Amino acid sequence: MPPLGAGILAAIVTLVADQASKLWLLNGFDLARRGVVKVTPFFDLVLAWNIGISFGWLQNDSQAAQLALMAVKALAVVALAIWMARSHTRLATVALGLIIGGAIGNGIDRLAYGAVVDFALFHIEIGGNTYNWYVFNLADVAIVAGVAGLLYDSFLGVPAAKAP
């Protein structure tokens, strides 16, 4: 499979897995009714609606703010798709596909619900204090993995991926 095909496949698989997990947790598992579901001593399922951007920054539920975020996201996806089409390494192309699939998945949430559906919470207890990580979803995991792949390819790959 050529690199571009692998990148497109990564985007599609990411998008489908992200949306399927969210639909199942919202409608099949009914996470909203169940509340916090302890999966392991360090991992819970919990429903959170993120109206901001990464890590809950810029929280704003106005329609104008949501439209602005969607416009920025759409431009970013177009730029990443151009970069992916021009990429010559499989790692960079797949990494870009992961980012694109994750961005589209979170964008669908924003259109459908007015916020991004987050559900995964890692935490640790040290000395009687609980420390929580941000609540996230599979799209977020794909975006972080894609960025890590791009960084790896940029520093150690030959030839390095270059943004358009």
Image (cartoon, rainbow, N blue to C red):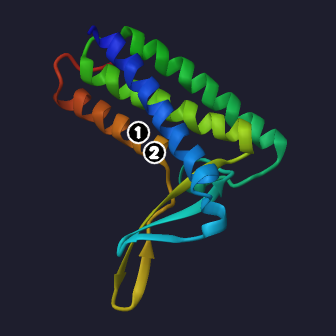
Check whether the beta carbons of the residues at disc 1 and disc 2 lie within 8 A of each other.
yes
Q: Nearer the viewer, residue 110 or 20?
A: 20
Label 1 or label 2, whichever lies nearer to me, is 2
85 sits left or right of 112 in the view:
left
Q: Which residue is mark 1?
A: 142
Q: Nearer the viewer, residue 3 or 65?
A: 3
Rendering coords of residue 7 (x, y %): 37, 19
Q: Residue at x 31, y 30 (%)?
A: 150
Q: Which residue is mark 2?
A: 138
Rendering coords of residue 71 (x, y %): 69, 28
Cα distance between the residues tagged 1 and 2: 6 Å
Specify the quadrant of the image occupied by residue 35. Answer: bottom right
Amino acid of disc 1: Ala
Amino acid of disc 2: Leu
Does residue 38 sit above or below 30 in this rendering? below
Specify the quadrant of the image occupied by residue 99. Answer: top left
Looking at the rendered structure, the secondary structure element under dot 2 is helix
Looking at the rendered structure, the secondary structure element under dot 1 is helix
